[in-house]
Every structure is written in structure tokens, then in C-alpha cells.
Image (cartoon, rainbow, N blue to C red):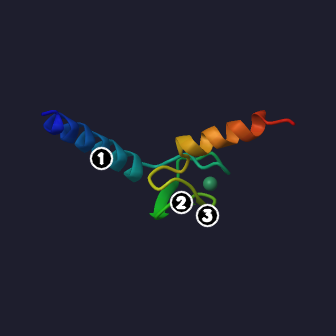
């Protein structure tokens, strides 16, 4: 029934993930767009040479940003 449409949606998401994975990302340390993916959830800035852990396909995951916000808002 709706399975074919669901499949198209998944393929579109995979394309978006690949695009995100292959582009340069801004470095949280020096701010330059020199961060490339080194391995699973590992990122390296080729400008200041720092390595850091992040999301599997993007250095900052939405879940990570949400958890940081949650931590910042918790002042009890
Ligand atoms: Zn950097």
C-alpha cells in the first residue's frame, strides 16, 4: 500500500545525509570551514588540527544541541 512512497522518502534522507557528510563543517574551535569527517562520529579540523567527537554524519547533532540546551536550562 504505502510502502513504495515510504521507500522514496528514505532514499531522499540518505541523499541528504551523504551531502551533509561530505561537505566541510565549521570548526567549533577556530570557526573555519575546515572540519572533515575522519571516521564514525570522529571529526578533524584541517586548519587548527583539532579532533573531536560528534554526530555520525554531522559534527553537531540535533540531539546533542537539544541536550546542551536541556543542561543549560537546568538550574536547580
Ligand atoms: Zn579549527
Labels 1 & 2 near each other (Cβ < 8 A) = no
- Helix or strand or loop: what does disc 1 sit on? helix
- Closest to the observer: 56 or 33? 56
Residue 14, given in percent of the width and then of the height, sits at: 30, 47
First in sequence, mark 2 or 3: give its number.
Answer: 2
User: What number is the disc on residue 1?
Assistant: none
User: What number is the disc on residue 49?
Assistant: 3
Looking at the image, which residue is at 40% across and 51% down? Answer: 21
44 versus 17 height, above or below: below
- Quote the CA–CA distance across marks 3 and 1: 29 Å
Looking at the image, which residue is at 62% across and 38% down? Answer: 66
| Crowd rating for badge 3 (residues with CA inside 10 Å; few <14, some 14–19, many 20+) | few
Residue 23, given in percent of the width and then of the height, sits at: 41, 48
First in sequence, mark 3 or 1: give its number.
Answer: 1
Picture quarter with the C terminus: top right
Disc 3: residue Cβ within 8 A of ligand 1's nearest atom: yes
> In which quadrant of this rendering is ligand 1 seen?
bottom right
- Nearer to us: label 3 or label 1: 1
- Closest to the observer: 24 or 40? 40
Residue 8 picture quarter: top left
- Helix or strand or loop: what does disc 3 sit on? loop
**Most distant residue in the bottom direction:** 39
- Nearer to us: label 1 or label 2: 1
- Closest to the observer: 17 or 27? 17
User: What number is the disc on residue 43?
Assistant: 2
Q: Is residue 17 left or right of residue 59?
A: left
Q: Is residue 74 left or right of residue 36?
A: right
Q: Look at mark 1 in the image and give the residue it sits on.
A: 14
**Most distant residue in the front direction:** 1
Residue 24, given in percent of the width and then of the height, sits at: 46, 49
- Helix or strand or loop: what does disc 2 sit on? strand
Amino acid at each position: 500500500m504505502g510502502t513504495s512512497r515510504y521507500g522514496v522518502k528514505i532514499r531522499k534522507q540518505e541523499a541528504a545525509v551523504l551531502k551533509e557528510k561530505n561537505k566541510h563543517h565549521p570548526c567549533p574551535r577556530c570557526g573555519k570551514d575546515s572540519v572533515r569527517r575522519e571516521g564514525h562520529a570522529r571529526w578533524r579540523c584541517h586548519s587548527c588540527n583539532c579532533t573531536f567527537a560528534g554526530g555520525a554524519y554531522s559534527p553537531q547533532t540535533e540531539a546533542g544541541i537539544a541536550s546542551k540546551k536541556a543542561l543549560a536550562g537546568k538550574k536547580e
